[in-house]
Image (cartoon, rainbow, N blue to C red):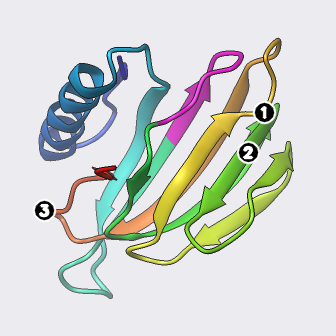
Amino acid sequence: MIVLRICAAPFVALTLTVSASAFAHETGAPSEKVTVLQEQLLKNVPGKKALMIEVDYKPGQSSIAHKHDGTAMAYVLSGAITSQVKGEKAVTYKAGDYWYEAAGSEHLVSKNASATQPAKLLVFMVLSPDEPVLVPLKN
């Protein structure tokens, strides 16, 4: 189950909580821990918000296949993360590495590359205020 420590607006909390509940029921397995660090409406980009989240993976843990309606930039804070976007090869990123995902990208793999060490990811997103952070992909 995705655990949330909310440090942002109630709307984001509601969006993430609803999404997290749906994922937990769909997968049946424990999922990564997602923490909202901050959320801000962008005055210079009407109709968009910036969102910063931290994703913690236990050893061997992974996310469900999903897409982001918004743009995402990710930075590995610790450990190693294997990521694959549809149409690209899977890449393992280590602490200090980063990548970009265009809006609408299908994120097929997002997992801790280690079976013995935890991993932590910082994600910055730009999306519409009513868009969920991620949308599960159907098989």
Query: In the rendered view, would you say 19 is above or below 98?
Result: above
Q: Nearer the viewer, mark 2 or mark 3?
A: 2
Q: Which structural element holds mark 3?
A: loop
Distance between the Cα atoms at labels 1 and 2?
A: 5 Å
Between residues 107 and 42, which one lies in front from this camera angle?
107
Query: In the rendered view, would you say 122 is above or below 72?
Result: above
Q: Position of residue 102 (x, y in %)?
A: 50, 78
Q: Position of residue 130 (x, y in %)?
A: 12, 62
From the viewer's perspective, tell me whether residue 85 is left or right of residue 36.
right
Mark 1 burial class by Cα count in 10 Å: few <14, some 14-19, many 20+: many
Find out whether residue 58 is within the magenta segment: yes
Give the mark nearer the N terminus: 2 vs 3: 2
Instruction: Indicate the amino acid at tag 3.
Output: Asp
Q: Are marks 1 and 2 in contact (CB under 8 Å)?
A: yes
Mark 2 burial class by Cα count in 10 Å: few <14, some 14-19, many 20+: some
Q: Position of residue 15 (x, y in %)?
A: 16, 43
| Residue 130, numbered circle | 3
The residue that disc 2 covers is: 82
Q: Are marks 3 and 1 in contact (CB under 8 Å)?
A: no
What segment carries the magenta color? 54-63
Q: Residue at x 71, y 16 (%)?
A: 59
From the viewer's perspective, tell me whether residue 106 is left or right of residue 80.
left
From the viewer's perspective, tell me whether residue 92 is left or right of residue 45.
right
| Residue 113, numbered circle | 1
Q: Position of residue 8 (x, y in %)?
A: 28, 40
| Residue 37, numbered circle | none
Query: In the rendered view, would you say 72 is above or below 113?
Result: below
